[in-house]
Every structure is written in C-alpha cells, then in structure tokens.
Image: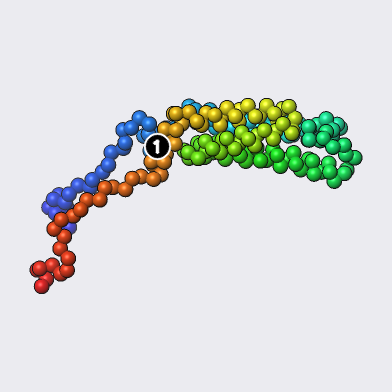
Amino acid sequence: MSDQTAAEAPAIATLRAPTDASIDPKTGEPRRPIAVWAASVLLHLGVALVMAGLLWAFWLSIDTFEQAAWLHGVVPTEPGALLRVLMVTALFTIAMLIAVASVIAAHYAWHGYGWTRRAGLIAVAVSLLALMINPLATWGILPIATGAGLLWLPSVRGFFQRWHARRHPEPPPVTEASGVFYGPLPRYR
C-alpha cells in the first residue's frame, strides 16, 4: 500500500468510556454501594461466629459432652456411643449448611445477582439452626439477618439492575434496509 492510499484510508473508529457515575471507569462494572459491602462483611462475620461456636462446642465436648452444645444435652449418651458420633456430625452439618447458605448469598450479591435477596432470606432461615449449637454460634444469627436485610435496600436493587443490564444488554434496534438488491448484480449479467 502506498503512502498516498494509507493517508486516504478512513480512521479507525473508537468508542469512549461510559461517563455514567454508577459505572467504575477502571473496570467498566457497576460501582458497589456501601450496603453491598456491608452485607458481604456481615454475612461472612455471621459464618465466622457460627464456626467459632462449633469449634468451641467441639473443644468443650472433650470434658463435658452434655453441656457443650444444646443438641448434645437432648439425649443422654454413653462415651463412645454411635449416637454421640451422629450428634457431633449433626452439629458439623448444621454449621456447614449455615456457612454455605450465607456465603452463597454474600458471594453472588457481591457480583450483582438479584436472586441473592431471596438467598439471603434462606440464609437467615437456615441460620436459626445455630440455636442447636451453643450461645456463641447463636450470635451469628444477628449479622446474617442484618446482612440479608441490607440486600433489600433500594440502592442495592439499583446495583442489581445495573448488573442485569450489563449481563443482558438490549439488542440494537432493527432498522429496515431499503434498496436491497437480490440476485446477481446488474453489472454481472
């Protein structure tokens, strides 16, 4: 290509970055409101409290099995009994259910999925199982409920809507073309 034809070639068109204040110019993603940050932190804090309660119950189970957790005191058991093993397994399962529900709600809320509001309600319902562990684990219910409640704020709803619009952009409007010629061009006939 000669220098003359290169100078005559049209310039490459570029797009400008969006100037919307709700979009982060560095990442192009919607900005997270404070409520999403707080909800994520609170949901994880609730899980940490439940896990601390579970570990405390395991530690106390060494000497005082019946007083270590509410579930342990329900049925009297002998040391080494299969029922004791099942009760400890039940405590672990309860803690894992609470952790999974809360972490899923926190993680996907952070990434802008609107269904996490309902997942937060499920996390609150599942967190009530912490009452079966001990008082320390029970303290995990409050941050989980508060974090799930923050997901219902209007600013968070807007954040979820912006993410939805980013993931599912509207298709460009269809313009009807006129003067479309079908078949061989007249110059080739």
Q: How is the image coloured?
A: rainbow
SS category of the residue bearing label 1: helix
Is residue 134 shown left or right of residue 100?
right
Tell which of 128 and 22 is nearer to you.
128
Is 139 in front, or is 2?
A: 139
Q: Quadrant of the C terminus?
A: bottom left
Q: Position of residue 184 (x, y in %)?
A: 15, 69
Q: How far across and down, in percent of the image, does residue 164 sit?
A: 41, 41
Left or right for 146, reference 81: left
- Name the residue furthest right: 78
For the point 88% across and 43% down, the residue is: 80
- Give neighbour class at mark 1: few <14, some 14-19, many 20+ (Cα, 10 Å): some
What residue lies at 42% left-to-right and 32% top-to-bottom? 158
Question: Dividing the picture into quarters, in which one does residue 186 lie?
Answer: bottom left
Residue shown at the point (66%, 40%) measured from the top left: 97
Q: Is residue 60 visible?
A: no
Q: Quadrant of the N terminus?
A: bottom left
Q: Is 2 left or right of 107, judged from the image as shown? A: left
Please state which of residues 142 and 64 is positioned toward the viewer in this rendering: 142
Residue placed at 31% from the left, 36% from the top?
A: 18
Count of marks, rendered view: 1
Q: Residue furthest bottom?
A: 189
Q: Position of residue 51 (x, y in %)?
A: 69, 34
Residue tagged 1: 162
61 horizontally vs 6: left or right: right
Query: In this orientation, which residue lies closer to the viewer: 189 or 173?
Result: 173
Give the quarter of the image for residue 44: top right
Q: Amino acid at mark 1?
A: Arg
Which of the 4 quarters of the picture holds residue 76?
top right
Q: Is residue 113 visible?
A: yes
